[in-house]
Each structure stands twice: as structure tokens, then as C-alpha cells.
Image (spheres, rainbow, N blue to C red):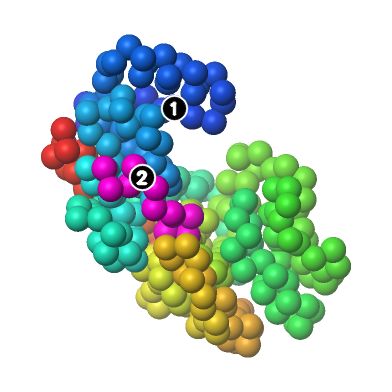
Amino acid sequence: MQEVLERAGHEVEVHDLTPPGRVQRTLKLLASGGRPWDLTIHTERTVSRWMELSRRNVLLPNPEWFEVTPGFSKMDAILCKTRWTLEIMSALHPRAIFTGFTSFDRRIPGIERADLAPLHVVGSSPSKGTEALIEVWTRNREWPMLTVVAWKKGLAIPVDVPDNVRVVRDFVDDSELQRLQATCGFHLCPSAAEGFGHTIVEGMSTGALVLTTDAPPMNEIVTAERGILVPWSTSEPLRAGRRFEVDLDRLEERITEAFAAPPGRVRATGEAARKWFEENNEAFERRLVREVDDLL
């Protein structure tokens, strides 16, 4: 967002309120009675003390982490990354606006890609469907090697995994992760919940075949024309959103079908995913700049 708004001529500062020193500096500004900023975009949660330093305030929430706080009703607008979030936030706030969102472009021009080399990037979320993937790979030990990137502490990765699953538990720097994303042509993202779906969208940016759960907001991003959707079996509330647990049998079926698909179809699906990534990125930039200009 910073780069997009700066290209549009806005001056942007990014602040992390976690360090105690940052909070103390905020309090000093409050004591001065000034409002040094025209607009503050709060990510995921509202920070009341920061609101008082800005003429206008908006929130960019993730439903699965969202909880109503005293500052929520005072927001000038709620910017929504997905249509699913828009539906949820429209019931809670009078000015919910769909802006969409985007992710980093992970394509590396000229790099050779293995079309159906399976990759699963866990990140820091416990909702990526990792256990489901390991279970279906355990059932099918003849499948190609699945690489699972899971270096974050506290993630529930089974100790015993089949021989055709490689778990990368050590830290992977960003350049190495991008190389993996760009060279592995089959990205498996059977998420139970997403605020937007960065691992999904990053996979699509490489032109890979991307598999995810047929539930919102994942199925806003991936459709049958630009990826693989897997039905879910159970669902339950998760704060303002929901969890959708992927159906294991359908997951196994969809992966089996992918491995048997003609190479031309796999590549065409990946090309459609890349096309969507480019169009979505451009649309998000237009919407974000327009909404910020309107708020100012």
C-alpha cells in the first residue's frame, strides 16, 4: 500500500506500535494536542490512542482476527480486501468499502518451472490445511515429493511424515522462498480461513496451478478457470468470519486429477491465474487511490 499511495503523490509513514518506545512517542504527541496526520489506515485492529493523532481513520480488517473495539464505530470507513469481508463489515459499519488487495509478484522471468512439483507454504498461520495435506500424502506414498515450508515456531506439523513429504523447518530467506515458489508449479493452499490469501495469490503470480478450498474468501480468488477448488466438509464461526475444513476425500481426488491432467491444461490454468493477478493488482491500485483521495 505504501508504494501505491506514494506513486499517487501521497506522503506515507509506516509505524509499528508494538515496541514500548513507539507507544511512548505516541503519548507525547497526544500530550501536545496535535493531529500530525490526515489519514491513518489501521491494519487488523483499531488503536484508539493513534486515532486521536489523525484527522481521518480507516480500518483494514481480517474477519478471522476481527473483534469489535470502542474505536471501531469511530472509523470513517472500513476498507475491505474481499467481497466476503465487505458482506461481513457492511452489517457492522455504515461505510464499508471494497478495495480488494494484492500480494507481491513472485514470478522470476526466465526461471524453469516444474509444472506439477508440489509446494505448500505454511507461513505463520495454523489455518493453512497442513495436516490435511500430510494426511492425503500419507495415503498416497507414490505421489511426487511435497515440499512443506514451515519454519515458524509453534506450528502443529506432525513429527512423523511420509517419505514423500519434505518439511523445511529451518528459516528460509525471502530470495530462497521466492525461488521455491517460482520453480514449483503446483501450489497447495487448502486453507480453512484467510483474511485475503497471500500464499494463494503469490502462487498465482508465478503462473502456477493453485489448489485451495471452495469457500470464501478463497474461492473469490481461485475459480475453476484459474485453479482447483476443493469442497469443504465442516464449518464453524471464527470471530467475525468462519473456518472451512477441507474434505479429505475430495482433496485426495482433486490432487489425483491434477497429477493426471494434460500439461497443456495445467499451463493454461496457470496462465489464467497470472492474468488475474495482473488485472487484480491494477484494479486494487485504482480503488485504493480513489478511496484515499475521497477520504482526504
The answer to whether residue 93 is above or below residue 4 is below
At which x and y percent is residue 284?
A: 28, 49
Residue holding disc 1: 15
The answer to whether residue 184 shows anywhere in this view is yes
- Does residue 239 appear to the left or right of 140 in the view shown? left
Q: Please name whichever residue, 154 or 134, is drawn nearer the observer in this view of the structure.
A: 154
Amino acid at the residue labelled 1: His
Picture residue at 84% right of the left edge, 63% below the top: 159
Picture residue at 34% right of the left edge, 42% below the top: 71
The answer to whether residue 121 shows anywhere in this view is no
At which x and y percent is residue 34?
A: 27, 16
- Name the quadrant containing residue 96: bottom left
Q: Please name whichever residue, 19 or 282, is drawn nearer the observer in this view of the structure.
A: 19
- Does residue 264 appear to the left or right of 295 in the view shown? right
- Name the quadrant containing residue 15: top left
Q: Please name whichever residue, 223 or 62, is drawn nearer the observer in this view of the structure.
A: 62
Q: Are marks 1 and 2 in contact (CB under 8 Å)?
A: no
Amino acid at the residue labelled 2: Pro
The answer to whether residue 29 is above or below residue 98 is above
At which x and y percent is residue 3?
A: 34, 32
Picture residue at 37% right of the left edge, 29% below the top: 50
* Distance from the alpha carbon under mark 1 to that under mark 2: 21 Å
Q: Which mark's residue is nearer the viewer, 1 or 2?
A: 2
The answer to whether residue 157 is above or below residue 2 is below
What span is in magenta?
62-74
- Name the quadrant containing residue 196: bottom left
- Which label's residue is closer to the chain start, 1 or 2? 1
- Numbered circle sitting on residue 70: 2
Secondary structure state at the residue bearing disc 1: loop
- Does residue 119 appear to the left or right of 14 in the view shown? right
Secondary structure state at the residue bearing disc 2: loop
204 in magenta: no
